[in-house]
Amino acid sequence: MSLVNIKIEGIPYQVESGLTILEAARKCGYEIPSLCAFNHGECNQGSCRVCLVEATGARGLVASCVYPVSEGMEIRISTPKAIEARRRSVELLLSNHSKDCQQCDKNGSCELLYVAQLTGAREKAYEGVHSETTLDVLAPALIRDTSKCILCGRCIARCQNAHGLSVLGFENRGFNTIVAPAQNRSFQNSPCIQCGQCVSVCPTGALMEKSEIDKVDDALRSGKHVVIQAAPAVRAAIGEEFGYPVGTPTTGKMIAAMRRLGFERVYDVNFGADLTIMEEGTELLGRIKNGGVLPMITSCSPGWINYAECNYADLLPHVSSCKSPHQMQGAIIKSYWAKQNGYDPKEVFVVSVMPCVAKKFEKDRPMMEHDGIRDVDAVITTRELAKMIRRSGIRYDMLPDEDWDQDIMGDYTGAAVIFGVTGGVMEAALRTVYYKLTGKEYGKITFDEVRGHDAGVREATLDINGTKVSVAIASGMKSAKILLDEIRAGKSKYQFIEIMGCPGGCINGGGQPYIRPVFLPHEDDDILDTYKEKRAKALYSEDERQTLRQSHKNPQVIELYEKFLGEPNSHLAHELLHTHYEGREAFR
Amino acid sequence: MAKLQEKAVAQIKEICSRYKNEKTPLMMILSDIQNEYGYIPLEVQELVSAETGISVAEIYGVVTFYSFFSLNPKGKYIIGCCLGTACYVKGAQNVIDKFSEILGIKPGQTTSDGLFTLDALRCIGACGIAPAVSISGTVYPKMSVDKVPAIIKELREKEGAL
Amino acid sequence: MIKTVEELNQKISVCTKCLDDKIKGLDNKRHIVLCGGTGCLSSHSDEIKAKFEEVLKQKGLSDKATVNQVGCFGFCSQGPFVKIYPEDTLYRLVKVDDVEEIVEKDIRNGEIVERLLYVDPATKEKVAKQDEINFYKKQRRVALYGCGVINPENINESLGMGGFQGLRKALSMSQQDVINDILESGLRGRGGGGFPTGRKWQFALNSQGDEKYVVCNGDEGDPGAFMDRSILEGNPLAVIEGMVIAGYAIGAQNGYFYVRAEYPIAVKRLRIAIKQAEEEGLLGDNILGTNFSFRCHLRLGAGAFVCGEETALLNSIEGKRGMPRPRPPFPAVKGLWGKPTIVNNVETLACVPYILRNGAQAFASVGTERSKGTKVFALGGKVNNVGLVEVPMGTTLRELIYDIGGGIPNGKKFKAIQTGGPSGGCLTEEYLDEPIDFDNLVAKGSMMGSGGAIVMDEDNCMVDVAKFYMEFICDESCGKCTPCRIGTKRMLEILTRITEGRGTMEDLAELEQLSDTVKTNSLCALGQTSANPINSTLAHFKDEYLAHIVEKRCPAHVCKKLMTFTIDQDKCIGCGMCAKGCPVGAISRTDYVAPNHKLASMKIDAAKCIKCGACISTCKFKAIEKR
Ligand SMILES: Cc1cc2nc3c(=O)[nH]c(=O)nc-3n(C[C@H](O)[C@H](O)[C@H](O)COP(=O)(O)O)c2cc1C
Ligand code: SF4
Ligand code: SF4
Ligand code: SF4
Ligand code: SF4
Ligand code: SF4
Ligand code: SF4
Ligand code: SF4
Ligand code: SF4
Ligand code: FES
Ligand code: FES
Ligand code: FES
């Protein structure tokens, strides 16, 4: 890597060549206000014009997010001209913006508002008509409000990079430009898989998850038995919302907080995850033994399920019939647990805390119920839970570490914890399958990257009693498509495939805390590259700390089968814990 | 996907296949469809998407970017009044206003009988004979407000729509 | 099929003689040529051509005279033109009905049809030959070489006019030498920016790449400019030749023409020319027996002004929305499909064969210190001789407007000339003696742009003109970047307020500030230059802005909201014609009968009047005034 000498505000630095001014400045300890730029060139429109600086060798001001550094360049961020130019760009943005910050759910993590403060933008500097706006609230998981969109294009790039779907695009021209699914339709009528990746990069309140906090409040007020359960990936990230370094697990404090919010029971979805492994592992074994449809594909990511139903209806028989862990656990709470406690299932309300926005959609699927009782009643994201905690005046950092409610669903194994990371479900399942077939423990599976990059396709081959089992994992639909097309063409060499909707899996889900360098001043400057790894590590370390690391060893799961379900894939298990999929009309 | 006639489906597929060997054929495909049908409705874009693998959002973005592409059918006669500088300083605004008045439509709209679409154009390169009006490809030189009624009358008579 | 230099030379000598014979009449024939440019075609030059053929046949003169269509003569406002060789007689404003007479008198009897000759407005004298018309006297044809002389659909005529001699020369030189020639000629881009063409080529030659491209920018978006159209219509092969030379110089194998879809005739002729060049082997593999291969492709624009901007144009060719890309990387490094690419304007490329054929010095000897050669202007607006003119750089505005353009019609007073289109600015009386070149125009607050030159007289409101341009920009902004997308809208809103009498002094201050912001902050030159018309009208016509804002008055009587229509009751004879034509019934009869008149006069109800102006044009007694 060659280095170039530059000066910022007159002070000499050496930086890697090829960096943009913005990136170089970040490395030297300057944060230039920016909006459209995201994660080295993931979105490099150079369009918001908020990051203007002076640089020698260029005529006038340059957009630091797209302008490369060069040898001898002198950069000035703080000249009156540059400061004023940046402020004016923001003021112009605000002049066509709804500016109802006080009602806006994004307030607090809004980059536009932050940049407005930073640049000293006066809200009413320029006034005039606003372009026509659209508020899309039809989709179960997502809200799109163009009155807050700054046309940065980050969402377009993310959807394209993650899934190759290009659900969103620029439409119209000039002042009438919007970012929307084709023909400004609702997400509901688009090929969107509701993963929320676009939400997680949107700098403003233009793309948001559909909040269900109100629903939870109503339930808490209603006198029902309100049970909350949290997915593994949540604990790996929620601390970020309260100022902890990325990758700090704050499980104990999170549990304590949930309890203080008034939930009757606080459960870990890990129990459901262990249950899922029992069911899914058994299903896989069955398929292998009985010549069933192979490869079998995991089913716990609703983002992926949406994609499959719309685009690969012909491959649905490959998808495991298992519900996702929180749906399974919800079904158990509404049946086994309610019975144990002598509650009428109708009086039980289950809230899931998820890293995911697609789960909001999943829980509303018609099949996710039993005898008219919904498995799960509300899904809130990691971000929403943090909001509820803050709202209640709870000082997260001062909370004691508490433990999950232990009564009948408190045990979990390390296998369950790693569900939140890409490859985790696969690894967890194989630990059990391997044991069932060999009676022995399997060490760590190492996956080799085979295709693509950044959360592309990875594969591994295991030797189980002399039989070679080939498995592969993919996250993000762009990578998944590679594997799916192979199956469709009859060329797949795998027996088991794990597919996750979000690149990197649920730790990087659409409902996780926003990763914004400006809001994370104590993180390293490469946090956008490392946060997934750091969150994953939090989960792996928890796995390692567990004494039980295989799902089939979870005593309460064993008890559940003994007392209630019978055995994995039993009739009752099928009724409560399995589902089916239907091809849906594909919007293009 | 809304229903397209079989013939149209076949033809659009044919248009897409014309440019099989081009690296980036979208603009050419859309131009041909626009020329053939006079507009590019969403169903057609969906078909083009299926044929080319380009997402509909992207195609829709392209269609709505270029003023030559239209989402709605246009009239049989497209009256394009140049409002380029050379024409504007010579009174083109009054000419288009007159068309607008007689046809009872605003620029960009089509008459209810589907006969006329009025468009404001930006220079058709006929500045030497400004103000210029182009009606379905025929350029009318040195237009003035008083010539407008006769032109409309003539076209209407030709269509037996008086 | 021309496979070698020798074969080309042979073909050229045959064609040259043929064309020469025709022009000089050595073949004992008369040659009728008609203008087949867009302007003249719109005045039925096609029908006139057919009529000539018919009449000649009828009269048995078919072997005595040929009929041909050529490209634009430039003097479009006087079209359609018919020119007769070898005498070089030029008839203008010809109609189908005139054909009989021309054939009978001129072709059969050699008499000039006097009534169809051009009349000099100053001297009232009739002028028979093209070169003697003032409009043509100061012109010099480099880019327009061959336009209006050769049949653009016949490659032989192009070859007869020096076509492909430039390429022949270039192929005998090294790539670097070709670029050196261009550098030495001082050629600067004619598309607006004026960037030295040789330097652009040098960058592309130095760029590493397995593939490279040449792109010809024929998007010609400046409303009021049509030189690229005329060149493509009049001599498309010259542009093709320029492109092939550029391709050779930088090491490209493929060239793309990007032409507006609004130019069907240009597109058709370009297609024909490409096909003919391919058939002759002047495009394709191993051109003239060398190992240089080059192909031309055609892409049509689809109605977006911003696609004239080179990076937006590349996106458009790539099938995307025409949104400009940030630079660097420049196209010469990373252009079409990420490969090194040069983008050159039509007129720029049309100059290239001339330079190679006649030498860099021949080109550089014309023009000013830093702007060499000639420039084509589209002279339009309030000037007597509207059309395309090609003059040496350094010609003054006065020469352009008065000597060539014949001054302002109807005895009106000159007010300003807008050069550079929506990115340019207006220049007033005091600048009339300024020489026109790239740098001088910029120094004076305008720019060369692509060569649009619109003359305005006292009847034009400069605030309205600024608003007109802002409306254009606002419509054509791609919407990608904040300052241009929103800023131009805000500026338009302010200008609209001012022209409607709702403007304030604070508005004016905000307008100045916005124009500064949009200029410094925008991503591409469309936004960066969008406020130029405002800045230059503010600089020269601040009083007009103030009249609108403070006095609520439009001095030029253009802004409708500030206009009032009144009837002079003493002049009005009460005929009632005005009332009949008023679309909103704003005119009614009073009970006042003016002395000497029989009927009561009329009056206008200002509250109802929509200021359409219909009444003024109906009143034969000039009783209605607008103020
Ligand atoms: C908004 C905008 C519109 C433009 N339109 C044209 C055009 O219509 N034709 C053209 O040749 N260049 C146009 N240009 C300039 C081109 O970007 C580019 O500089 C030019 O094609 C380069 O060719 P040249 O060096 O031969 O002039 C435009 C630039 C801008 C910013
Ligand atoms: S998106 Fe940001 S700036 Fe806009 S209303 Fe919401 S908080 Fe305020
Ligand atoms: S910032 Fe000002 S306006 Fe906003 S809440 Fe506080 S006091 Fe009120
Ligand atoms: S939710 Fe996911 S699939 Fe839908 S638009 Fe956003 S990124 Fe694309
Ligand atoms: S929705 Fe959000 S991410 Fe997408 S363009 Fe608008 S502001 Fe940017
Ligand atoms: S990967 Fe996780 S967060 Fe993403 S859609 Fe699937 S379940 Fe939701
Ligand atoms: S300046 Fe205007 S045209 Fe250029 S990129 Fe910005 S919005 Fe688009
Ligand atoms: S200007 Fe038009 S509306 Fe006003 S009085 Fe005259 S005819 Fe009537
Ligand atoms: S047309 Fe003229 S003269 Fe006749 S009534 Fe009207 S104003 Fe009077
Ligand atoms: S952050 Fe650089 S232009 Fe938007
Ligand atoms: S301005 Fe109207 S044709 Fe050019
Ligand atoms: S078109 Fe005939 S002179 Fe220009």
Image (tube, helix red, strand yellow):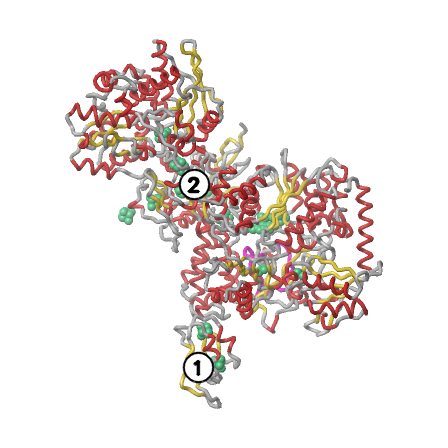
- Asked if ligand 9 lies within 8 A of label 1, the reply is yes
Q: Secondary structure at mark 2?
A: strand
Residue A109 seen in this snapshot: no
Identify the residue under disc 2: A168
**x, y (%) of residue A131?**
40, 52
- Categorize mark 1 by other alpha carbons within 10 Å: few (<14), some (14-19), many (20+): many
The residue that mark 1 highlights is C602
Name the residue at the bottom extreme. Answer: C596
From this view, report whether residue C235 is shown above or below residue A157: below
Which span is picked out in magenta? C415-439
10 Å crowding of disc 2: few (<14), some (14-19), many (20+): many
> Which amino acid is tagged 2?
Leu
The relative height of residue B144 versus residue A541 in the rendered view (above or below) is: below
Residue A537 lies, in percent from the top left, at 36, 22
Rendered view: A44 above or below A94: above
Q: CA distance from mark 1 to mark 2?
A: 61 Å
Quarter of the figure with the C terminus of chain A: top left
Q: Which mark is residue C326?
A: none
Say which amino acid is labelled 1. Met
Q: Is residue C437 magenta?
A: yes
